[in-house]
Amino acid sequence: MSLHQIDIRDAFFDQLYLKASSDKNIIVLSADMDAFSLRRFAKDYPDQYINVGVSEQNMINIASGLALSGKTVFCYSIASFATLRCFEQIKVNICSLNLPVAIIGAGAGFSFGYDGPTHHGHQDLSSMRLLPEMTILELSSNDLAQKAVDYSIEIKSPVYIRLDKGLFPEWKNHKISFSKGFRILKPLQKINIITNGYMTRKVLNLVEKLNSNEITYGVIDLFCIKPFPADFYKDIICKSKIIISVEESCVTGGLGSALSEVIAQNEKECKLLVIGAPDKQFIEYGSREWFHKKYNLDEDGILNVITNRLGR
Amino acid sequence: MIYNNNKKIFERKASEIRIRALEDAVRAGKGHLGGSFSCVELLVSLYYGKFIRISSNKPKDPNRDFFIMGKGHACLSLYPILLDLGFISKDRYLEYGKNGSSLGGQLDVTIPGVEYNTGSLGHALGVCAGIAKAAQIDNRKNRAISLLGDAECDEGSIWEAIMFAAEHKLNNLLCIIDRNRLSVTQKIDSEILFGDFEEKMNLFEWDCYTIDGHNYTEIFEALDKFSSSDRPTMILANTIKGKGVSFMENDVKWHHTMPSMNEVEIARQELNLEKV
């Protein structure tokens, strides 16, 4: 099957499988978290796969010890538990030692919507942003997922990757550079929408419809939110009159928050409209799309917010 | 046994460490003397007994043993050893406690011979388990040794590591608990955790030995047993917090209190090297 047609988790773990076949120092730790393509990894490379059980703190501590001994470690768990449950282990035992450990969070945003606020993955990016040594990647397409594996191994320092599920076919003719950290999916306009991950496709669909009208929007996939891309200010913010950020994470500390910091610190007169999940623990249950509709993260909702706030 | 031939040397080293720790704390006006004094004989055994296979000539040797002090706040007892064995310079040693110092109240990896940034409790054993696991995977001879405080054992992540180590049969993993029976604020005499501890640890599929943590013969016997076991090993070392200075012993006050000038004089007399 081509990369175009497979689940993004398979794109990611198949690439990890490939890298691990030639690099025996790559170790995968799972906190009892499953993925179809990870089963093949566990079966074929039993010496490079450890299920640590339901113990995220221990998973990070073991990863630290392995990495101190020369291993490159990938830790896999549900986004909320892989970050918040073991935040201090990540801070002290991975980041303060600047170790080559990639933490893979499954259950992006509201994709585990039925499982309640414990399982919602909308505070992972904000929490990881507090860690100075952390690189944070939010993946919007299979080719990005595939290349994120290579990049995580290359940089030999802590990485957090929010890994979604389902089909994320790549867009043609868009080069990926992790050192650049973003890619322009629709040419820059006066109004540009900055997004990433699952929301990217949604925003593109919306813009396809809107751009047929008189106002046109540029779309940028800011897939590396930390370190904040060096050229983003010059290449994107300086060329925008209005920026709209769209993210499937809480607005406290996420993508929009990062953009607001950059805009404010550079005293740029650029209007910013932040669209994301409210600062809230959602004690309610529903599908991802149900949450998106309720909290204005579906296409209609995003459009309504833009129209109301910008008066267009 | 290495101790029988070096008895005087070990006892002298222990006294020197306590005196240095006292003087360093007094000079800087800060430090954790009680918990530093309780683990001196353990540290002397590990370093001067050549149990930890690490050299100041090549502290990052891939074949070394890894030692992580979970109770890094007891660094006042480790710094004199690192100085004596050539890991750190005299200049750096004397920086302890100064503003902007490169030697502080916790251990960090900028110090040669230190593997880990200490300060937050409950992590050391898990990190050591990862180190031990890596050696097992690669069929290398490294051993991972952690020294924990007894109050630290309330941290749940330690118990996650204990189960992991047993499941993976990490016989290159050693955990020593400095059982000095005092936390920052209270006595920890409860038997809920440490009562029948050997039996409990055996049920977790660890070897476990309870020893007098100030008695070299018992310390070395337990270390020997670790070296020949096929399971992870726990040593519960019964110690006295503040050991060596009568008014500091077994008193919760001396977790991080600084002695008055009068008390310093008494402590100096009691730790007098001439008595060794």
Image (cartoon, helix red, strand yellow):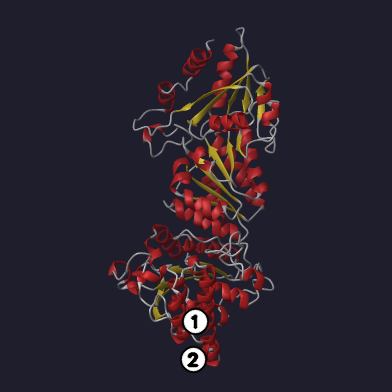
- Check contact, mark 1 vs mark 2: CB within 8 A: no
* Residue bearing the label numbered 1: B224
In the displayed structure, would residue A186 be above or below residue A21?
above
Residue A266 appearing in the image: yes
- Horizontally, is B41 left or right of A156 in the view? left
Depth check: A233 or B122 in front?
A233
Quarter where residue A120 is shown: top left
* Residue bearing the label numbered 2: B275
Q: Name the residue located 52 percent from the left edge and 11 percent from the top edge.
A: A311
In the displayed structure, would residue A61 be above or below residue A108?
below
Q: Secondary structure at mark 1?
A: helix
Q: Name the residue located 43 percent from the left edge and 53 percent from the top edge.
A: A53
Q: Name the residue located 56 percent from the left edge and 38 percent from the top edge.
A: A10
x and y percent of residue A168 in the render? 57, 29
Depth check: A298 or A246 in front?
A246
- Amino acid at dot 2: Lys
Depth check: B109 or B91 in front?
B91
Residue A1 appearing in the image: no
- Horizontally, is B38 left or right of B185 in the view? right
Name the chain letter of the residue that bears numbered label 2. Answer: B
Q: Secondary structure at mark 2?
A: helix
In the displayed structure, would residue B266 be above or below residue A162?
below
x and y percent of residue A154 in the render? 68, 47
| Separation of residues labelled 1 and 2 (CA atoms) | 30 Å
